[in-house]
Image: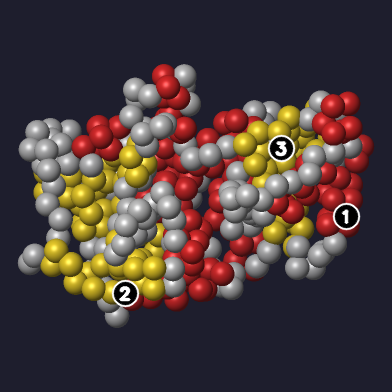
Amino acid sequence: MTQMNAAMFYAPMDVRFERIEIPKPGPGELLVKIGAATTCGTDIKTYERGHPTIIKKTPSTFGHEFSGEVVELGAGVTSFAVGDRVCTCNAVPCGECFYCKKGHRNLCEDLLILNGAYAEYIVIPARMVKTNVYKIPDHMTYAEAAVSEPLGTAVHAIRRARIEPGDMVAVLGSGPLGLMLARLAVLRGARVVLSGEITEERRRVALDFGVQEFVDIREVSDVAARVDHVRGLSDGKRGVDVAIEAAGFPSAWEEAMQLIRAAGTVVFHGGCKAGTTVSVDTHSMHYKEHTLIGVYHQDPDDYKRSVNLLASRLVDGRKFITETVPLSQVIKSFERVRRFEGIKFAIDPSKME
């Protein structure tokens, strides 16, 4: 067999399912047969409006969260074998640029990005093989292992948040990353309130993850009322210790800043559209010593921790997967996520129907 199924991105809202050539691994590379690729908000936004970093030319394969089986080794590879079940972070730093040497590898100036998970096979580049590929244990499904990439970004955010045992943490956004952030905050010993579109499925998963309070923004549409409610849950109604924004809207950024106590921290995890701005209450910022932190992507160490959390099931990746569907259903799965009909969908590229 020389050809494979692939979802090809031609333009925003134009994805075509085609048969293309199976790639060959070069020196230091791995050819992986994808066992599962999961849906992600970034891929949905890429489908809807393109992405200048992930897709620089068209047509292109796309999708970036996956795990699978090694089926061919490039020359010189000795750390993996054919048959190994593996997962990888889809981006790896160079280790040599200004930011890498400053310890900010997530901001690497020569970040290598891998794209093409919505296809039967993918070649993992040599730099990635050296740094960001891990064997997964037999008990892990391919779908839960694919969750390792987004979980790594949540690990990065939680690490920056410096949550202490007994803290109260508000997470704004009830999608996959909001649920991941909530779970990691619970593991840090925090009492967590989750605010967002709280569907029955998301509530069930969040409760399993240890979340104690919820704010359904569909029921409480007034921002001031939500802020008053969350602050009312906190010690002395002073506000939460940490608020983490995971929705990706400027209005949610501003809401998060209203939730924290004096000397509290806000972590901005959700990426907003380029060119958008938010307003900051300078009086509160100055006199209440607020800390505002932007977070982006992840460090290779964050990704390693993510894989370990999933392997131990301290974070149970299976709970994020609503359903496994064939490759031909990837766009319909995007639409279902947009309608809050699921958390994540696992795509099986080997099946078209």
Task: Return the x and y of residue 16 as percentages of the image width and height.
Answer: 31, 74
Q: Is residue 201 above or below residue 34?
A: below
Q: Are marks 1 and 2 in contact (CB under 8 Å)?
A: no
- Tell me how far mark 1 sits from mark 2, CA to CA: 44 Å
| Secondary-structure class at tag 2 | strand
Q: Which mark is residue 16?
A: 2
Q: Is residue 103 above or below residue 10?
A: above
Which residue corresponds to the image point at 71% horizontal and 37% vertical from the top-left?
266
Which residue corresponds to the image point at 25% horizontal and 34% vertical from the top-left?
127
Task: Return the x and y of residue 284 as percentages of the image width and height.
Answer: 87, 33
Q: Which residue is mark 3?
A: 266
Q: Is residue 211 visible?
A: no
* Camera-nearest label, 1 or 2: 2
Q: Amino acid at mark 1?
A: Ala
Q: Residues within 10 Å of mark 3 (few under 14, many from 20)?
A: many
Residue 150 is left or right of residue 94, and the answer is right
Residue with the most extreme bottom position: 353
Residue 28 is left or right of residue 303, and the answer is left
| Secondary-structure class at tag 3 | strand
The part of the image, by quadrant, that contains residue 286 is top right
- Tell me how far mark 2 sits from mark 3, CA to CA: 41 Å
Task: Return the x and y of residue 140 as percentages of the image width and height.
Answer: 35, 51
Which residue corresponds to the image point at 82% horizontal and 31% vertical from the top-left?
285
Q: Amino acid at mark 2?
A: Arg
Which label's residue is closer to the chain start, 1 or 2?
2
- Tell me how far mark 1 sits from mark 3, CA to CA: 18 Å
Q: Which residue is mark 1?
A: 224
Which residue corresponds to the image point at 58% horizontal and 37% vertical from the top-left?
295
Residue with the most extreme top position: 101
Which label's residue is closer to the chain start, 1 or 3?
1
| Secondary-structure class at tag 1 | helix
